């Protein structure tokens, strides 16, 4: 057999460098065994109604195979788009027009489409500090330049949008849009206040820049409440992207984006050059799931399950890390954000895995990747009964590292 040797030299620049920091940590966490895993923001598979989902799939195939098993429109099936427009209006007091919504293949696909549609190579994308590291990967892969806005203990500081625009321009990068996660932010778990949301919309209008609002965790407030979305407050300057990976299933790979018609049309054109369309079968399943009332009826149980896990994790942190660390108090979503002064969380991660506990170091969530004393803990998939033992192991690792 011919040996081709190292072919890394043929890779495009965007594909060079091998596995990133997060990939290496997640690979360690995938070892299984007695590991208590606080890494990925994965939904609990025990919350999937497998029987109902199999029935929805069978019904779609048996009653409309010409739809379920065929290519779909790049904008998504008309029936599902109508269901999503109604779903958006139920909690946001704003209904996107038919041309203002597209079905995507999950949240990352929505991010990819909006980035390709709005950001030329070398353009700046303004992000929170910290922000979702998967989003930064999308931006940099598409040759955009992430530029950090300021955050404090309450989340994004709206006034920093203008500051970041100035910073970007000084670096020779014209701002394309600002990316924000106002609801139970990844990784911080913070909920941006209504006042700050309104101020952010005003700042975007003043700066003449679009906002891309990621609402992946909006439906997961433990008490079922909703704050006004940024899209609701400023539909003229906002593209909202969402996913059903947390509330339906990630395996069906479905999400959406809504916003000004010109931008949605551009995203639809981009989609014809990526995966062409979201899965028609999955769209049929989700449409029936929403129309038959299962989506709305199922949310309370999902919220209760994650609230229980979150409470168990916060209690364990209070027991084992009080005085040694600080952490956010999420009221929804999947994550809490822990700061351990004096600890290099990235360097310590392999030792933590060796001790039977895994987390995601904080550095990759920052644009400059220099902050190393934070770590993200996900409570979404770890059983509540395992939280205390997991944090006990983590506390032991931190104590030994401090010498």
Image (spheres, rainbow, N blue to C red):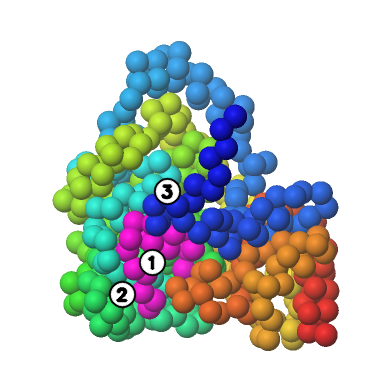
| Mark sitting earlier along the chain (1/2) | 1
**In the structure shown, which secondary structural element does the residue marked by tag 3 occupy?**
helix
In the rendered image, which quarter is residue 53 located in?
top right
Where 202 sits versus 252, above or below? below
Q: CA distance from mark 2 to mark 3?
A: 43 Å
Q: Whole-percent x and y of residue 71?
A: 33, 25
| Crowding at mark 1 (Cα within 10 Å: few <14, some 14-19, many 20+) | many
Q: Give the camera-side residue of 85 and 114.
A: 114
Q: Is residue 230 visible?
A: no
In-image side of 287 versus 382 (left or right): left
Q: CA distance from mark 1 to mark 2?
A: 10 Å
Q: CA distance from mark 1 to mark 3?
A: 35 Å
Magenta residues? 131-149
In-image side of 359 versus 300 (left or right): right
**In the structure shown, which secondary structural element does the residue marked by tag 1 occupy?**
strand
The numbered disc on residue 200 is 2
The numbered disc on residue 10 is 3
In-image side of 313 versus 177 (left or right): right
Which residue sits at x=78%, y=84%?
402
In-image side of 165 versus 309 (left or right): left
Front of the two marks 1 and 3: 3
Q: Give the camera-side residue of 156 and 357.
A: 357
**In the structure shown, which secondary structural element does the residue marked by tag 2 occupy?**
helix
Which residue sits at x=28%, y=39%?
273
In the rendered structure, are the residues bearing label 1 and label 2 in contact, judged by CB atoms less than 8 Å apart?
yes
- The residue beneath circle 1 is 180
| Mark sitting earlier along the chain (2/3) | 3
């Amino acid at each position: 057999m011919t040996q081709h040797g190292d072919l890394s030299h043929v890779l495009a620049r965007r594909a060079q460098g091998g596995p990133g920091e997060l990939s290496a940590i997640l690979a360690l966490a995938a070892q299984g065994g007695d590991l208590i895993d606080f890494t990925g923001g994965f939904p609990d598979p025990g919350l999937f109604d497998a029987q109902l989902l199999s029935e929805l799939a069978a019904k779609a195939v048996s009653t409309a195979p010409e739809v379920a098993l065929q290519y779909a429109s790049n904008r998504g099936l008309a029936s599902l788009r109508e269901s999503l427009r109604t779903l958006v209006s139920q909690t946001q007091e704003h209904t996107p027009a038919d041309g203002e919504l597209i079905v995507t293949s999950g949240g990352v696909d929505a991010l990819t489409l909006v980035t390709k549609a709005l950001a030329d190579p070398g353009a700046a994308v303004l992000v929170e500090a910290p922000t979702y590291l998967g989003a930064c990967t999308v931006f940099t892969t598409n040759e955009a330049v992430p530029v950090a806005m300021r955050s404090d203990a309450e989340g994004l500081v709206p006034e920093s949008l203008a500051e970041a625009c100035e910073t970007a321009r000084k670096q020779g990068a014209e701002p394309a849009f600002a990316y924000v996660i106002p609801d139970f932010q990844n990784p911080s778990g913070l909920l941006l206040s209504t006042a700050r949301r309104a101020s952010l919309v005003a700042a975007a209008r003043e700066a003449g820049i679009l906002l891309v609002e990621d609402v992946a965790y909006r439906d997961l407030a433990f008490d079922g409440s909703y704050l006004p979305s940024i899209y609701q407050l400023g539909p003229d300057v906002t593209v909202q992207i969402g996913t059903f990976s947390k509330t339906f299933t990630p395996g069906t790979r479905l999400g959406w984006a809504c916003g000004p018609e010109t931008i949605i049309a551009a995203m639809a054109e981009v989609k014809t050059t990526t995966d062409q369309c979201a899965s028609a079968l999955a769209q049929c399943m989700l449409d029936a799931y929403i129309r038959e009332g299962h989506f709305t009826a199922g949310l309370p149980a999902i919220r209760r399950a994650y609230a229980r896990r979150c409470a168990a994790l916060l209690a364990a942190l209070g027991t084992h890390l009080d005085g040694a660390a600080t952490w956010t108090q999420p009221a929804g979503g999947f994550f809490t954000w822990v700061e351990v002064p004096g600890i290099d969380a990235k360097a310590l991660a392999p030792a933590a895995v060796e001790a039977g506990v895994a987390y995601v170091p904080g550095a990759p969530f920052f644009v400059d990747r220099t902050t190393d004393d934070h770590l993200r803990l996900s409570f979404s998939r770890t059983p509540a009964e395992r939280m205390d033992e997991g944090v006990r192991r983590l506390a032991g690792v931190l104590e030994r590292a401090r010498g």
